[in-house]
Image (tube, rainbow, N blue to C red):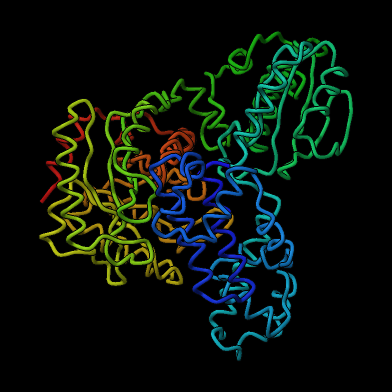
């Protein structure tokens, strides 16, 4: 096991122990141990092999023994036994927003609630109202969280699925009988939440392709098998459909199985108005299929410019294509640097140097460090002395490294009254300030709107972070009026963050067109807490494309000198 896997298991052991009601000292030992391992700069394998793991501060003899077992054998029987001793339903209950291990343990011990269904029933029976530590407000919040989970059951985050889809794609390309193949469906449209993986292929030997497909190692179950469509379930739990068509049908099938239902309906209506029939097999004049070598020719046959997959939602793309007004959408290569990156000064894992090295590998030329502010004590928020120390460290780095620039920022909590953390003396130190809400999620949409706009009136605010506070498949957020938020951002010259973490994708892509129309800049930020989180930026590019954004609409496509000029002009 590597460092990341070891830390994950140690943290989960802490959670499992809390679910069993173990004392907090034991729980904290594992949770703190996980964080210690995450922050290691040395190679964990070497530490284990040399026995130096026992000398790492925060790692006692018990933890050192278990870490050694994981690194050397790849297994930890203690973890497996612990996990199997706890009802699976309790682990599922952890998905409910605001319901932590302590409360789940209490529910299990006092009311014998062992799964989400039993919990929902207990809430409807008002059994939580008199329970110590709960009450009516908590009960209502739990019920709301359960409904949210049910709403999205059987759905998956784009970031959790795209890697699996790309692996399948590469495996199927190795099949000799496959001619053309592509990802389709919501994944190809860069939907932030998808239900399954859709693949479309062309071949003259569909039977052999399907045999190859169902024999892949990650296949857990063959749900349905046929010559033109086969459905499997992967070991990860997601369903995957593969459709195989003739070569001449491929461009039409790819278009059909990529577009949303609304886009496809609008396209068929357009074809009908022009005297041709359109379906997944082609465009037909009578019984004659019109030839199309690729999707571009499919659109051209209907008098349209090519419509990128991300835009195929029937939100004006067909009308724009008719006029030749499809914009040149932003690409991954346009991104020059990233903001909203956390270091181990707060709740990040890596040092400044480690993050810079990975940023260079990703092709970036600048980095915007923004650890949590002092109010976020739960995330190791920076006090004034820590801010000054980090400021000096970044200044020293920039002097020594002229080929890469680090901007010093902060993710400042927005207080209930709309004010920011820190006095002006501290705020003036930063090159940029991201203002974000991290507490008080029960506020109404009107209150949230007022709170965010109040923060944006501060001359120190450069960006508004994850404006709705949502966690996809986990928390709905506080639902501010985004039209008012975008208008206020325009008035106060505030950049709106597109938080590219796959769990957020916030601002929602449906509002990006409005931001673009209003002339509000968007910054695609990874909200990275470790080096691999920097690559979430590229998920954000897909969302930005879905929102019709061009290079000129995105702040972090600017070269470093222009970014410096912009931030200098913005500073008070």
Choose between 423 and 33: the one closer to the eye: 33
| Count of numbered circles in the view | 0
- Left or right for 397, reference 54: left
The x and y percentages for residue 130 are 60, 91
The x and y percentages for residue 535 are 44, 35
Q: Is residue 285 visible?
A: no
Residue extending farthest to the bottom is: 130
Quadrant of the rendered structure where residue 253 is? top right
The image shows residue 467, relative to residue 169, as above or below, that is below
Q: Is residue 255 visible?
A: yes
Q: Give the residue at x 40% y 47%.
A: 40
- Left or right for 108, reference 349: right
The x and y percentages for residue 78 are 67, 59
Quadrant of the rendered structure where residue 71 is? top right
The image shows residue 477, relative to residue 443, as above or below, that is above
Q: Give the residue at x 29% y 68%.
A: 415
The image shows residue 486, relative to residue 379, as above or below, that is above
Q: Give the residue at x 75% y 10%.
A: 248
The x and y percentages for residue 260 are 64, 36
- Left or right for 36, reference 386: right
- Left or right for 317, reference 368: right
Choose between 179 and 85: the one closer to the eye: 85
Residue extending farthest to the front is: 50
Q: Give the residue at x 41% y 23%.
A: 328
The image shows residue 397, relative to residue 22, as above or below, that is above
Q: Quadrant of the N terminus?
A: top right
């Amino acid at each position: 096991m590597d460092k990341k896997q070891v830390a994950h298991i140690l943290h989960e052991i802490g959670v499992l122990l809390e679910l069993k009601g173990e004392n907090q000292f034991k729980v904290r030992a594992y949770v703190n141990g996980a964080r210690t391992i995450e922050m290691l700069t040395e190679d964990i394998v070497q530490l284990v092999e040399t026995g130096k793991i026992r000398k790492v501060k925060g790692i006692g003899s018990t933890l050192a023994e278990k870490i050694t077992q994981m690194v050397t054998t790849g297994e930890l029987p203690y973890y497996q036994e612990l996990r199997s001793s706890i009802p699976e339903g309790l682990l599922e209950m952890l998905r409910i927003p605001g319901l932590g291990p302590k409360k789940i343990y209490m529910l299990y011990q006092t009311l014998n609630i062992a799964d989400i269904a039993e919990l929902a029933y207990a809430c409807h029976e008002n059994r939580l109202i008199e329970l110590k530590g709960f009450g009516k407000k908590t009960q209502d919040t739990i019920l709301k969280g359960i409904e949210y989970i049910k709403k999205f059951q059987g759905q998956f985050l784009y970031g959790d699925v795209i890697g699996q889809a790309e692996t399948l794609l590469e495996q199927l390309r190795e099949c000799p009988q496959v001619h053309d193949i592509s990802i389709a469906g919501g994944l190809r449209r860069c939907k932030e939440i998808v239900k399954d993986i859709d693949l479309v292929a062309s071949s003259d030997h569909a039977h052999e392709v399907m045999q190859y497909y169902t024999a892949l190692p990650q296949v857990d179950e063959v749900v349905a098998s046929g010559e033109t469509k086969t459905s499997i379930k992967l070991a990860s739990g997601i369903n995957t459909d593969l459709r195989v068509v003739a070569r001449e049908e491929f461009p039409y099938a790819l278009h059909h199985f990529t577009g949303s239902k609304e886009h496809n309906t609008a396209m068929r209506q357009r074809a009908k108005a022009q005297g041709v029939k359109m379906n997944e097999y082609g465009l037909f004049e009578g019984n004659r299929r019109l030839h199309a070598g690729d999707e571009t020719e499919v659109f051209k046959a209907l008098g349209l410019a090519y419509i990128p997959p991300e835009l195929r939602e029937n939100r004006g793309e067909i009308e724009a294509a008719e006029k030749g007004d499809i914009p040149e959408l932003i690409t991954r290569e346009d991104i020059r640097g990233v903001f909203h990156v956390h270091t181990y000064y707060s709740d990040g894992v890596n040092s400044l140097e480690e993050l810079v090295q990975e940023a260079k590998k990703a092709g970036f030329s600048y980095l915007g460090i923004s650890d949590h502010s002092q109010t976020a004590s739960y995330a190791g928020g920076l006090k004034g002395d820590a801010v000054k120390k980090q400021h000096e460290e970044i200044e020293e780095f920039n002097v020594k490294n002229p080929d890469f620039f680090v901007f010093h920022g902060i993710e400042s909590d927005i207080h209930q009254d709309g004010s920011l953390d820190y006095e002006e003396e501290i705020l003036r130190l930063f090159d940029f300030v991201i203002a974000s809400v991290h507490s008080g999620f029960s506020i109404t949409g009107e209150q949230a709107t007022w709170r965010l706009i109040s923060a944006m009136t501060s001359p120190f605010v450069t960006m508004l972070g994850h404006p709705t506070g949502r966690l996809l498949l986990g928390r709905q957020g506080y639902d501010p009026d985004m039209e008012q938020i975008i208008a206020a951002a325009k008035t106060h010259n505030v950049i709106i963050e597109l938080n590219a973490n796959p769990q957020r994708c916030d601002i929602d892509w449906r509002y990006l067109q409005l931001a673009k129309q209003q002339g509000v800049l968007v910054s695609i930020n990874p909200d990275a807490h470790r080096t691999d989180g920097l690559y979430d930026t590229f998920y954000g590019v897909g969302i930005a494309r879905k929102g019709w954004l061009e290079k000129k609409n995105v702040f972090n496509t600017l070269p470093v000198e222009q970014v410096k000029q912009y931030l200098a002009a913005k500073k008070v």
